[in-house]
Amino acid sequence: EAGVAQSPRYKIIEKRQSVAFWCNPISGHATLYWYQQILGQGPKLLIQFQNNGVVDDSQLPKDRFSAERLKGVDSTLKIQPAKLEDSAVYLCASRLRSSSGAEGNTIYFGEGSWLTVV
Amino acid sequence: AQKVTQAQTEISVVEKEDVTLDCVYETRDTTYYLFWYKQPPSGELVFLIRRNSFDEQNEISGRYSWNFQKSTSSFNFTITASQVVDSAVYFCALSEATSNTGKLIFGQGTTLQVKP
């Protein structure tokens, strides 16, 4: 079974430029998450989708970050304009569904997209 | 409030030594899940184990074992006979089942270095 796919793996941009990250979750997984991991810290949730609807975006800096999951499968996370403090790894993750018991509640992560803002 | 604390920032051991990574959590929920993930230099978070709050039975998987104690709100992870390939950052995480979102609250991570 294919895992969570993300691209690009690495991106270097100048501050005030824009960047977009793409994620394809595990097939059949209804829930999709975007986490931000700053160097030396644990990941923090930015936004969660259930199918194509937003469940939680309370920690998303909406003045510069946006995300969508139009068809309930792939998702895109955009940052515009980028700030130096946005340098981090952006991790996409997916979960089957909560009604599937313990296994359905396990969240699987992709390799991440490493962003450096200079 | 939910919180996960991994007090050990970095641990360095020599190959074949046993090592225990500590994790302490806080939650007001009675139903929750605890997880351990491994993050090698490639960056991917690799799922290791999930434990729900009603199952305090310890688990062993090869060289890995986990000790879950609700009385002390701890979920510690032991690697027996460590190997160089175990070098990575290890994260403990908490998910509250009642919220039904599956949102993970992570600890700060423990960097394990296993020297040959």
Image: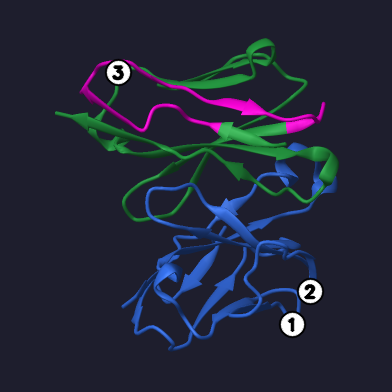
Q: Disc 1 vs disc 2: Cβ atoms closer than 8 Å?
A: yes
Mark 3 crowdedness (10 Å alpha carbons): few <14, some 14-19, many ≥20? few
In the rendered structure, the residue with mark 1 lies on which chain?
A
Q: Nearer the viewer, residue A97 or A39?
A: A39
User: Which image quadrant is residue B73 in?
Assistant: top right
Alpha carbon of mark 1 to alpha carbon of mark 2: how far?
A: 6 Å
Name the residue located 73 percent from the left edge and 19 percent from the top edge.
B55
Q: Amino acid at mark 3?
A: Ala
Query: Chain A in the picture: what colour?
Result: blue
Q: Observer-nearest residue: A107 or A16?
A: A16
Give the numbered dot on residue B81.
3
**The magenta stretch spans which residues?**
B5-32
The question of residue B55 being in magenta is answered with: no
Q: Identify residue type, mark 1.
A: Leu
- Secondary element at tag 2: loop
Q: CA distance from mark 3 to mark 2?
A: 45 Å
